Image (spheres, helix red, strand yellow):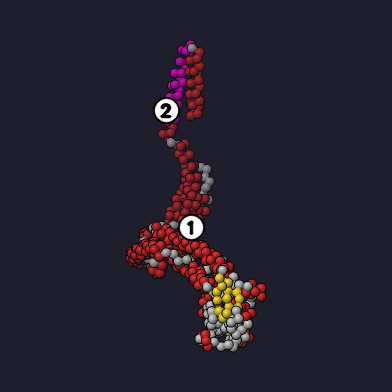
Amino acid sequence: MADETVTEPVNTAAPEEQATTPAPEASAATPAPTPSPASMPKPHAPSPAAFAKKTPAAKPRAAAPAAATAAYSEADVKAAEAFGRVDDNGTVFVKDGDAEREVGQFPDVSKEEALALYARRFLDLKAKLDLLATRLASPNIKAREIDESVKLLGEETSEPAVVGDLAALKTQYEELKAAGEAKKTEIAEARKAAQAKAVAERTAIVEKAEALAASLGDNTNWRSTADKFRNLFDEWQNHQRTTVRIDKPEAEALWKRFSVARTTFNQARRKWAQARDNERTAAKEAKEAIIAEANELKDSTAWGETSRKFNDLMDRWKKAGRAGRNEDDELWAKFREAADTFFNARQADRDQINSSEKENLAAKEALLVKAEALVPVKTDAEAKKARQELAKIQEEWDQIGYVPRDDMRRIENRLDAVDKQIKAIEDAAWKQTDPEADARKSSFEEQLNAQLAELDAKIAAESDPKKKAKLEAEKATKEQWLNAIK
């Protein structure tokens, strides 16, 4: 509605000096100045307060006809004109309740022109009220804007210099005034709810920070937790920028809680960092001592003992802890260099030994062919001859030396097999010529013969069939033993 404002130049001359020449026609109206960027309208319509300030009410008697830019229907203008009249002197009157009130004077224009001008002024004022009604339905109107608009429109509608239905205009104003109070209450409640929501959201941020601070311990991932606190702080700042302002006491109390949680984390992280630095220093010193010992051992040729010592050094290295990534890499390179010096020398020695052992293996396998050719043997004489040849082979075997460990049991078992076959024939021959064995056999035979004679006497003297049968069974068993040793 701001574009419909009628621009009216005001004649500031004294009443008795007023010009009788009519004011310029609408076509000669001076163009409105171009507004500055600061005064450009916002996307929504201007407030009634701004509208009222922009188009001040005309003075009753000093106004002249103006260039009309508002577009009102002829019916609206005529309806407003019905509440006014113009006398022969050009004085304009309006019905105000049961009375009539003078609102202005245009002596040098027609009555129709004067009455139409003041009717349009009424429609302009009504448009301001309509604009306020529209703004009250807007979600972005502010309480201050309502107060300013209602105040200015109250001044303009108290005794307006217009022609129209003043009673309806004032009724509309009172209704808008009541609607404005209701809107202010709604705005206050909405703001209260928005503040409560903002407090709850900011409290949630604080509680997350406090939960992080309460969870700190030996297993805390400090880097990850620091990132979480940083994100919560960014969330806090963004919340301050994008949400409704909350009451200062609540904001300060929440910030204090958030700050305490962050301080708790920062202090704990500094304490952890100090302990970590101490551990790294101790680990560095321990590993430097290990490196010194490794350098003393690296040229040793006591392969077994030194290997065990290097294994012990490795165990100590693992238990020493970390000295920091860069320093750990440098220290490990030094330790690895000393260890490699020793183990490479040991491997070279082993390679040389393995070559000799393979040669020894070939020699012993050749001896095995000779030994295995000695068997089988069947007689004691063959066994004695084979034993003599095997003794020569075993003597040569012992002089050859070590063979690879994986082959040792295999070739030893083959040689033992030859020895066992020869020994089996030797044992059999010995049993046949053993005088002690013959003596033991003769004594046992005599014992059995004596027991059989005794059993014959008992059987002859026994009259009880059962006892006699038992004695005869015992006699049969002993006779079997006697036949077995003959």
Residue hosting label 2: 443
Residue type at tag 1: Leu
- Please, what is the three-letter code of the amino acid marked with disc 2? Ser
Residue 391 position within the rendered picture, expressed as x and y whole percent measured from the top left: 44, 50
Q: Which residue is mark 1?
A: 361
Check the image and report above or below for 118 versus 260.
below
Q: Secondary structure beneath disc 1?
A: helix
Outermost residue to the front = 88
Residue 198 sits inside the magenta stretch: no
Q: Position of residue 217 (x, y in %)?
A: 39, 58
Q: Is residue 288 visible?
A: yes
Q: Residue furthest top?
A: 463
Q: Residue at x 48, y 26 (%)?
A: 482
Q: Is residue 129 visible?
A: no
Q: Residue at x 53, y 88 (%)?
A: 17
Q: Which residues are magenta?
A: 440-463
Q: Position of residue 204 (x, y in %)?
A: 45, 60
Asked whether 299 or 273 is in front, the reply is 273
Whether 44 is drawn above or below 33: the answer is above
Q: Nearer the viewer, residue 66 or 135?
A: 66
- Judge from the rendering whether residue 139 lies leftward or rightward of residue 441; answer left or right: right
N-term mark: 1 or 2 = 1
In terms of secondary structure, what is the magenta stretch mainly?
helix
What residue lies at 45% left-to-right and 26% top-to-bottom? 445
Secondary structure under tag 2 reads helix
The span from disc 1 to disc 2 (Cα, nearest Å) is 54 Å
